[in-house]
Image: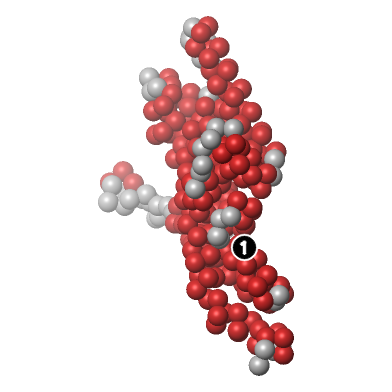
Amino acid sequence: MSISEMNFFERMLYILDQYSGSFFRGAATTMVIALVCTFFGCVIGLLVGMLQAKEPDRKDNVVKRSLMHVVRFILTCYVEVFRGTPMMLQAAFIYYGASQVFHINLGMWSAALIIVSVNTGAYMAETVRGGILSVDPGQTEGARAIGMSYSSTMFHIVLPQAIRNIMPQIGNNLIINIKDTCVLSIIGTVELFFTFKSISGALYTYFEAATVTMAIYFVLTFTCSRILRYIETRMDGPANFDLATSDTLAFTSGLTKYNKNTGGSF
């Protein structure tokens, strides 16, 4: 029986039977690029966001403050350009531009990792900056008042709280990267979407191949979202806290009750 004589479900089973290996390799490439680039994008965003959130110190000399303004201007340009242009055009610009202008021939993996990491870093920079600003300024002022440096204050006081606040956005960027790796097909990266185009073009079964590919994308994103939700729950800690009753000063913890009749405690 030729594929044209099969019904929809038979064609889907035929595609899965004949090209399951190709789908698996494409999905694996997609996940590797998404995970690695999300990690490096978070590192880039962390560094850029910290520099953007840092206010110039009046005690610094003019040269240092001027240099800080120049650095912040460059970082702002980086963030705005990569957030304001499509990643597909960024991929073509970096991949073909590096070859034509700088005579640097990037391989498939190198180009893919650089493009997605830099793009993710631009989005994460604003996320990190917002997370830092969401922490109570009084904590930073208190840390600086007791003599802590800016870097110590940031790494020991502010960032642990900021990272918890931005954890949902980190997960969101991972989900976006799983889907947006499809734009890398423009530079020949053999990921999941490239696999779909190859199979559908060979068999002329666009609807069936698209259905299978969408199902794979959904499984990947749904699984990652559940894992990230679990990590967020673990980071929240227990819902209720109680003082340790082994401490004699805290022995009454949990023994005080509210009297509904008198409106007081007993």
Residue 129 rendering spot, x and y as whole percentages: 57, 34
Query: Could you say which is closer to the camera, residue 218 or residue 82?
Result: 82
Q: Nearer the viewer, residue 35 or 17?
A: 17
Q: Nearer the viewer, residue 263 or 118?
A: 118
Above/below status of 16 relative to 186: below
Secondary structure at badge 1 equals helix
Above or below, comparing residue 255 to residue 115 in the picture: below
Give how far across and how far down residue 179 sits, in percent.
Answer: 61, 58
Find residue 13 and report its image quarter: bottom right
- What residue is shown at x 50% (from left), y 73% (from top)? 21
Which residue is the extreme one toward the top? Answer: 62
User: Can the viewer see residue 49?
Assistant: no
Q: Residue at x 49, y 33 (%)?
A: 47
| Residue 143 sits above or below residue 172 on the image | above
Residue 43 in the image: state x and y as whole percent: 47, 40
Q: Which of 138 and 103 lies nearest the eye of the viewer?
A: 103
The N terminus sits in image quarter: bottom right
Asked whether residue 145 is in view, the answer is: yes
Label 1 is placed on what type of residue? Phe
Q: Is 153 left, or right, of 174 in this rendering?
A: left
Q: How many marks?
A: 1
Residue farthest along the bottom direction in this orientation: 1
Disc 1 designates what residue? Answer: 193
Report the side of 249 relative to 117 (left or right): left
> Left of 151 or right of it: where is 68?
right
Residue 3, quarter of the rendered image:
bottom right
Name the residue located 48 percent from the left edge and 23 percent from the top edge: 141
